[in-house]
Amino acid sequence: MVNPWILCKKIFSLSLVFNALLTIACAVGIIAGFYWTYPDWQPFHPYLADGNLFWVVIAAAAINIFPSALLGRKLHTGRFLFHHYFYGFLVLISASLYVIAFTPVSLNAIFLVNNTSLNVNMGRFFLLGGLTLLLDDLPDVSKRVERSLNYLKGNVLKGHRFLVVSQAFTGIVSLYLCIAVLFAMWNVPQWATLANAILVITVLVTCITSFVFVKKKIWQHIPVS
């Protein structure tokens, strides 16, 4: 039987990975809006200096994914019938079929369109959930994948000082963006939407995670296989 505390920490690790992916998805949707859908749109202007800062938020979330997943991989929760990545693939395939069959949005544009309907958001949620499970257990997919990831990790960690500085910088920018969006929602009633509230929460969690990882010097303590 799995220790409840270990299970809670595993869920916490998965939640951080999911939040990072959700942050990226939210940022990509907004970037797609002012790059292609609404070329003259300045998101959250004048409270946000430049919409391109969402690229920095994407970087912050991407940097957080590996150490977040590593927190869960250190825990021994066992498995039910299959490896976790099997369920990740299963959820991804099921969610993809759901999007294709039951939503008006194509699968390759699911995170790029401005559509907040329930069925589209459900498709997004389960796609991100499946990807979270897959990333959490990715090294166990095959020995070749594990060796490739270890090789990549070893090369990345050679520049751990750059990673620390990047994580601190992207965390600060994410915090600024979070505050800017919050002020925009407070001062412009039509911007006070559920989607923007989710954006604020997920970016806030991303920047807090960045600061915690920097403070704990997480990159200096990651072992290289």
Image: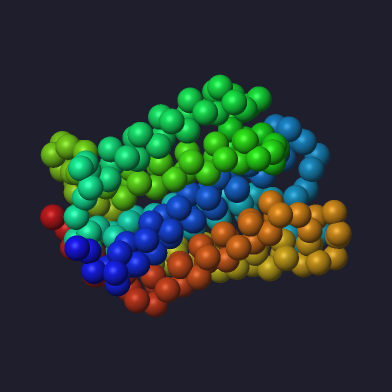
Q: In front here: 224 or 11?
A: 11
Q: Is 50 in front, or is 102?
A: 102
Which quarter of the rendering shows the C terminus?
bottom left
Above or below 189: residue 215: below
Q: How many numbered marks does the figure carry? A: 0
Residue 205: percent from left, percent from top = 53, 65
Does residue 110 sit above or below 195 in this rendering? above
Horizontally, residue 101 falls left or right of residue 7, namely right
**Which of the 4 image quarters holds residue 188?**
bottom right
- Where's residue 156, x and y in %? 28, 53
Residue 68 in view, yes or no: no
Which residue sits at x=35%, y=34%?
90
Q: In the image, what residue occupies the spot 48% across and 25% down?
A: 97
Q: Quadrant of the N terminus?
A: bottom left
Residue 118 drawn at (x, y percent) = 65, 40
Residue 82 visible in the current orientation: yes
